[in-house]
Amino acid sequence: MTVATDEAAPAAMLLASIVFRVQPHKRDEALSAVDETLRRMRTAPGCARTRLVADTEDPNMLTVLSEWQTAASADNFFASREFQIFKGMRILMRDEPVLVIDDVRSRVTRLLRAPTI
């Protein structure tokens, strides 16, 4: 006997992280280029969210975080002309940027509340 089920596998989400360090005297110029990249990324098909994060110990160490609905949508953006602005800012960086893509199968969101007395 076969039992039909309506349960579908959870939708995967891809988290892309680009970590890079900018030259201190070029930080403002780099931030301008990153801002343009984020603007383009936010309007790309399949991009759900983007953020720019600065390290608290090294303000020149930056991370672009983005969430993608599919691997194809992320791959398409990172291979596109829209992403060329970011690639072109290599002269403003101290090191080569590193792109990491994580496949996330579930997410738990909770409010952090102060304990009640």
Image (tube, helix red, strand yellow):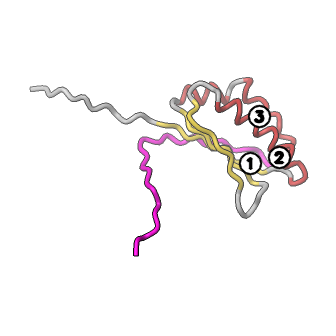
Q: Are marks 2 and 1 in contact (CB under 8 Å)?
A: yes
On whether residue 82 falls in the magenta region, the answer is no
Q: Farthest residue toward the left?
A: 1
Q: In percent of the image, x 18 and y 26: which residue is there?
A: 4
- In the displayed structure image, the side of residue 101 where residue 90 appears, left or right: right
Q: In percent of the image, x 85 and y 47: which residue is there?
A: 28
Number of the front mark, 2 or 3: 3
Measured from the top left, where is residue 42 in percent x and y?
64, 32
Measured from the top left, where is residue 102 in percent x and y?
53, 42
Q: Mark 2 points at which residue?
A: 93
Cα distance in 3D space between marks 2 and 3? 16 Å
Image quarter in which the C terminus is found? bottom left
Residue flagged by tag 1: what amino acid is it?
Phe
Q: Is residue 14 above or below residue 59?
A: above
Residue range in magenta is 95-117
Q: Name the residue under label 3.
A: 36
SS class of the residue under badge 1?
strand
- In the displayed structure image, the side of residue 62 where residue 6 appears, left or right: left
SS class of the residue under badge 3?
helix
Q: Mark 1 points at which residue?
A: 20
On whether residue 96 falls in the magenta region, the answer is yes
Residue flagged by tag 3: what amino acid is it?
Glu
Image quarter in which the N terminus is found? top left
